[in-house]
Image (cartoon, rainbow, N blue to C red):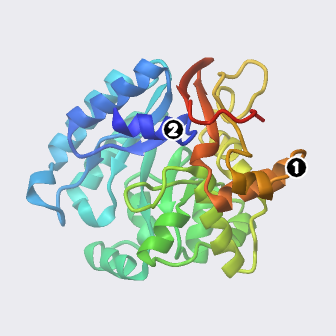
Amino acid sequence: MIFTAASLKNGTTTGFDFSTVHKEACDALFTAASQLDMALIAGKVCMDRNCPEELQDCPTSAQKDSAALIDRWHNRGRNRYAITPRFAPTSSEAQMASLGELAQQYKDVYIQTHLSENVDEINWVKSLYPNATGYLDVYDQYHMVRERAVFGHCVHLTNDEWQRMADTGATVAFCPSSNLFLGSGLFDNAVAKQYEVPVALATDVGAGTSFSMFSTYGEAYKISQLNKQPICPLEGFYMMTQCAAIAHQWDDHIGNLNSGTDADFIVVSPRYCELTSLRIEEHASFSDMFFALSILGAQRAVKQTWISGRCCYENKENNHAMA
């Protein structure tokens, strides 16, 4: 599959992905990941309004298809399922209720959706859900704000919403490349820290501009600089590895190289061209190397990607010494 191949090429060992609205596409994604023994959290997108007619499902089919996919894939091997309303404006109250029933029935599945990406979207949600106190409350009314719930963007949360995220153990997926490309706003990581809400970096390749997590940190750094709260390289590295694993309650298997965890890792050749050889000293610190690769672009620096102890990608054009 092109998607998984691109992920491996860019050094991504675990996916947290939206499929399409089609059940078959979600099956195909889980099948491709299973063939690699790749850790994957994914779900069929559900939407029954404010979208192209050919991409609509309905409350009944959204619930039925999602339940079938949960039964088939959740906790099968390294697969985990995420109930996936695209976002509140594309789901009717009836569909949200049907997915909320699933969230109550399957306590250990994940939730993924979008939240407060831009101001116009927030106003739209208010018009569609007049009985909700805010955007997050829409999901809360349908039992979707909890541990293992991941909300993309969260650029314009209120203080009350930040507190609710903290109280429930929900997670933010910070998508800097997408936020910049769409002009959505500047995510404030300092506020997330204040409320102790976990923040994981995400490429959001639907609207983002790169599959590379190195580049994603580079974009996050630019946003944090504009907010006068720069994210240091070690923090950025943590946000794309251990932080996500802990927040999603999977750190006993992924996100680190502790004894007993799965052998998912990448091998990097940082000095892969004349420019990086000039910029990165031979005995550079990890922070300096990581920062330089994130700013200069690092896809070519990925020498190998290993999944479950097996090399699943090798860049044969990169013959520089590995580090």
- In the image, residue 116 sits, relative to residue 4, either above or below, namely below
Give the secondary structure at mark 1: loop
Q: Nearer the viewer, residue 188 or 232?
A: 232
Q: Is residue 95 left or right of residue 106?
A: left
Badge 1 is on which residue? 284
Q: Quadrant of the N terminus?
A: top left
Q: Nearer the viewer, residue 289 or 97?
A: 289
Q: Position of residue 21 (x, y in %)?
A: 23, 46
Identified at 50% across, 54% down, the residue is 203
- Is residue 200 in sight in this rendering? no
Identified at 34% across, 78% down, the residue is 126
Give the secondary structure at mark 2: helix
At label 2, the amino acid type is: Lys
Q: Position of residue 308 (x, y in %)?
A: 59, 20
Q: Residue furthest front?
A: 274
Name the N-terminal-most of marks 1 and 2: 2
The numbered disc on residue 208 is none
Other-residue count near label 2 (Cα within 10 Å), few / some / many at <14 / 14–19 / ≥20: many
CA gap between label 1 and label 2 equals 24 Å
Q: Is residue 101 left or right of residue 313?
A: left
- In the image, residue 213 sits, relative to residue 119, either above or below, namely above
- Is residue 7 in sight in this rendering? yes
Question: Which quadrant of the view contains residue 44?
Answer: top left
Q: Nearer the viewer, residue 115 or 213?
A: 213
Q: Position of residue 152 (x, y in %)?
A: 48, 59
Question: Which quadrant of the view contains residue 314?
Answer: top right
